[in-house]
Every structure is written in structure tokens, then in C-alpha cells.
Image (cartoon, rainbow, N blue to C red):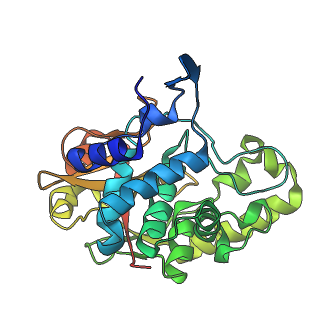
Amino acid sequence: MERLTRRSFLQAACGAAGSLTLASFVAPFQELQGGQNQHLPMTDEEIFAKVMMLAAETNLAARPIGDGMAVIGLSFLGVPYRAHTLEAPGDEHLVVNLRELDCTTFMENVLVLARCARMRKVKFEEYKKELQFVRYRGGVLNGYPSRLHYFTDWVGDNERKRVLFDVSKKLAGKPVRKTIDFMSTHPESYVQLKNADFVARISEVERALTERGFFSVPRNRAPELLKSLKNGDIIGTVVSMKGIDVSHTGLVAIQDGIPKFLHAPLSGGKVQLAEGSFADYMMKSRSITGVIVARALEP
């Protein structure tokens, strides 16, 4: 493989108008070095640098953050899926993994990377601080329960931090009252919940989420919702399954005027753009009863 230069990367980024993917850079690739082919897997820091190069060339700092999220999100097309990315052994710590993504870490990282681009935070340490700010309650890492495990908790906390705004009610969402308790009633599914104190703290969060409720745009309003979606809108799919608020997350990317669902699903094993419109995606999945929609605020 010909050596990848900064200029060739940037030319490809501009020429693809946001369709360039990082997948071939994330997976081990071969680079000609001194006449020898060597496997050179990309590090998270190198991937971050590539994204910031793309952001600079496409001037994302001067564009609406939602557009930046769509451009950056599309650059991750094809990146491998990995389940339970954040459930690392040992004490809670900031997990950074741009090489493999699940639905939550894909959505979350794209938001954080777009915020970094918008604020011209191009240092890897700045990205990690921003990731912690978005991922943990109040931006403070204080053990496993401080992570925002439930989507509605993540949205609510980041709304208070002025990272985003829950637009579900504005988009004709209906109030939903549902008992949220999956983690505390299934502690065996979480290695960290062998700690009884953690279960108690998670249970407190669940009670607050249950009491507060949330707004969801009903499934039957999918066609109307389509007209209101914008680039970078954050989606959580609401399901009838007991104990949880949403089952899947992703982003909106508008192509040829059509809002589409950009996500990292287990099926397919990689970041992908769902076929058809987002309304088509909603209607194809019988388990989806509605969606929560959050919109990033300009940092």
C-alpha cells in the first residue's frame, strides 16, 4: 500500500464530501516502509488525529455542530462493532476505544469529536477530558455508578451541562411512564454490580428516572418526524421491554435530502448507514414503540 500522506488523506476527505471512512485505517493495514510490509494497527490517538485533520480541511469549526457530527459519523462507516465496550475490568476508568464501537460509544464519541472540532480542541488529552465530561454525571468520574448508563439519564445530565437539548416533546413526543430498573434487577449481567453498594446507588438513579419519565415520539408519527430531523440528531429507540428506556442509539445523517440512521448495530458487525429513510428504519422494526431525539447545542 502506498504511504498515506496528510495531503492524500485530505484530498480524499474533500473529494468524498464526508463519505470517506476510517475503517481501513482503524483495522490493521500494510504500509510500505523501507521495502518491508509491516502491519501497523492504528492507535486511538492516531485515529483522533485523522478526524481532526478531516475537521480542519472541511472547516467543521465554522459549521453547525450537527453537520460536523454527520461528517465525522460517516467517516466511521465500516469500523468494527464490539459489544460492551465500556465494561472494562477493574476500577472504573475512562475507556477510550475509537478502533471498535458499540451503539453507545459510537454516538457518544461522534458527539465529543464534533465538540472538539467546533472548539478547536485538537489535543488528545483535550478529547479525553471532553469524553469524560459527556460520559459521567456532572462530568465527574466517581466510580461505576457515576457513569450515565441509561440513555435517558445520559440525555438529562448532558442537557443540564448544556451539551444538548431533548427535542422529543417539541417534535410531538408523548409522555412515557415506565419503571426503569433493569440493572438493579439483573446485577448478574454486570461484573461491577457484584458490589452491593453500587447496586444501591444505581437503584437510586433508576427510581429518579422512573419518577421523571420521558417524552417519546410515537412510532405512528414516523413520517411527520422525518420532516423535522436534522444532521447529527441523536436517536434513542424506545421499546416495550421491561426495565429499560431505550434499546439502541444512533445518529441522523442527511443524504440527498433524506434523513437516514447512522449507527453501530450488532447485526452487520460494523458502523453502517441503514437503508432508506429513518422513518423506514422505525417502521421496519416492530420492537420500536417510539424514539427519543436529542440535538447537540453549539459548545
The quadrant of the picture occupied by the C terminus is: bottom left
Return the x and y of residue 58 as percentages of the image width and height.
Answer: 29, 60
* Closer to us: 249 or 10: 10
- The residue located at (51%, 53%) in the rendering is 49
- The residue located at (41%, 46%) in the rendering is 6
Q: Is 287 drawn above or below residue 202 in the view shown?
A: above
The quadrant of the picture occupied by the N terminus is: top left
- The residue located at (49%, 68%) in the rendering is 116
Based on the displayed image, in which of its 4 quarters is residue 53 positioned?
Answer: bottom left
* Closer to us: 126 or 30: 30
Return the x and y of residue 244 as percentages of the image width and height.
Answer: 55, 55
Q: Is residue 25 left or right of residue 220?
A: right
Can residue 283 be seen here? yes
Q: Is 201 drawn above or below residue 182 in the view shown?
A: below
- Numbered label tally: 0
Return the x and y of residue 28 as percentages of the image width and height.
Answer: 54, 27
Can residue 290 be seen here? no
Return the x and y of residue 112 as percentages of the image width and height.
Answer: 50, 64
Based on the displayed image, in which of its 4 quarters is residue 281 positioned?
Answer: top left
Based on the displayed image, in which of its 4 quarters is residue 224 positioned?
Answer: bottom left
Q: Is residue 67 left or right of residue 206?
A: left
Q: Is residue 120 left or right of residue 179?
A: left
Taking the view exactly as shown, the residue that stands out farthest to the left is 256
Taking the view exactly as shown, the residue that stands out farthest to the front is 34
Q: Is residue 193 left or right of residue 118?
A: right
* Closer to us: 167 or 258: 258
